[in-house]
Image (cartoon, helix red, strand yellow):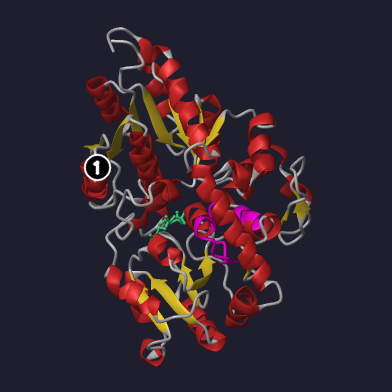
Amino acid sequence: MTSQNRQLHVFFFPFMAPGHSIPIIDLAILFAGKGVKSTIIAPPPDAAHISKVIEKPRNSGYEVDVLDIEFPTVEAGLPEGCESLDKLSSPDMLVKFFLATQLLKRPLEDLIRQHRPHCLVADMFFPWTNDVAAASGIPRIFFHGTCAFSFSAMEHVRLYEPHKNVSSDSEPFLIPKFPGDIMLTRSQLPDFVTQETWFIKLFNEFIESGSKSFGVIVNSFYELEPVYADHYTNFLGRKAWHVGPVSLSTKGIIDKTNRGKQSSIDENECLNWLKLKEPNSVIYICFGSMADFDSCQLIEIAKALEASGQSFVWVVRNEKEKLLPEGFERKMEGKGLIIRGWAPQVLILENEAIGGFVTHCGWNSVLEAVSTGVPVITWPVAAEQFYNEKLLTEILKIGVGVGARKWKRLVGDFVRSEAIEKAVREVIAGECAVEMRNRAKRLAEMAKKAVENGGSSDSHLNALIGELKSLSPFNQVNN
Ligand code: UDP
């Protein structure tokens, strides 16, 4: 059989957190749409959900499958059921969680030996997968889940340490040798950059494994950040394929209602509620799968929403519902829809009633806003979200910040209701609202074109698949 006729088989190994697994599942389906056999590796509870997500593509003839990998919660000293980052309830569990992921090396090797894929696409949080792939003679592709702008900006800060040359946490510094004169403050940087925490060594390993991998898949599209996509390759020397937005590529192929998790609201209830609203009039508020605000912050948000006079859809994590102001939901009936738990985010953002998105700037949420042409109210909390905010407000100019100044894992900086209300008003009806909306809509058009046949992302994906097929593991006679 010639290599042209043989089928490429790729393993996809997402980190166990919704913000990491959602785009990798999309990616696996995207590959399968190109005739690749895609296998997703996940612990049983996630694998069960993934099986449901891939049911529709499988019924349409896509060769996409999921394999269980047992997550060693007990061995790592974690309570049962903690197979996903969003299930952890204390910082010491985080250390154990990362330790547990390292114990996945042996089971992954076994799966590779059994199923003999030609390539391994693995999350950045699994640096050891470079060795696993190398031992099996296959390439490992690195997936970091953010954009070229933020990843390179982070690299510049890591390499040049500009935060060490300022005298306070609030004094701004310029990111050195980085296009666009981007200023940040030390308080906006992750604690593992500014302090000697246990995570810093691990983080450096993650980044170094990226530079030693076969290349990087970026969930972004070239036209969104051309300067930074080029910079990523030319300055950082990373071989990269910009294949996103992956959520747009799988549109119509997967069921959007239960993307990531089972939705807490019936799709029709949600859409019927939005149907009654004017176009661009509703604010959607959601802080992803990890951020976890306290009662005081939720009260400030509630006050701001009421004072803004806008209709809203607000996603409040299950266990937090009791912390909302007494009687708030009743008072807001008709004006506000509160979703407790998990919302069908992409479905909501696509609705023409949505006029603004209050977001923590997680990259998936950012790209989903871009793909649907929705301007943003930015409220970064942790991870690389302060960098993403810069891209949105200063480079793409499709958003306004609420003024969060401090990086704080999960809980974020405290923001007063007046600042939230002001940002909401500016995005919906401020002086620059129309311009911002038009820019967002133009980006959405560009995103759509990028993933169409012959678009930049589609071409990058074809090039990557072509390159994988030209490699020796794929061409070996006995494969
Ligand atoms: N998401 C969702 N419903 C929710 C919360 C989140 O569908 O109620 C999805 C969202 O669409 C995005 C992902 O979960 O795809 C969150 O990823 P992001 O990078 O935005 O943030 P993280 O959760 O990693 O902080």
Q: Position of residue 29 (x, y in %)?
A: 34, 40
Q: Position of residue 272 (x, y in %)?
A: 33, 76
Residue 234 appears in which quarter of the rendering? Answer: top right
In the image, what residue occupies the spot 60% across and 57% down? Answer: 442
Q: Position of residue 312 (x, y in %)?
A: 46, 78
User: Disc 1 residue type?
Assistant: Ser
Mark 1, ligand 1, within 8 Å: the answer is: no
Q: Which residues are magenta?
A: 370-391
Taking depth in this image into account, of 37 and 264 the one nearest to the observer is 37
In the image, what residue occupies the spot 43% across and 68% down? Answer: 351
- Which residue is farthest front? 453
- Is 181 left or right of 16, judged from the image as shown? right
In the image, what residue occupies the spot 40% across and 81% down? Answer: 276
Quarter holding the C terminus is top left
Quarter holding the N terminus is top left
On the image, numbered disc 1 is attached to which residue? 60
Residue 327 in sight in this render: yes
Displayed-image quarter of ligand 1: bottom left
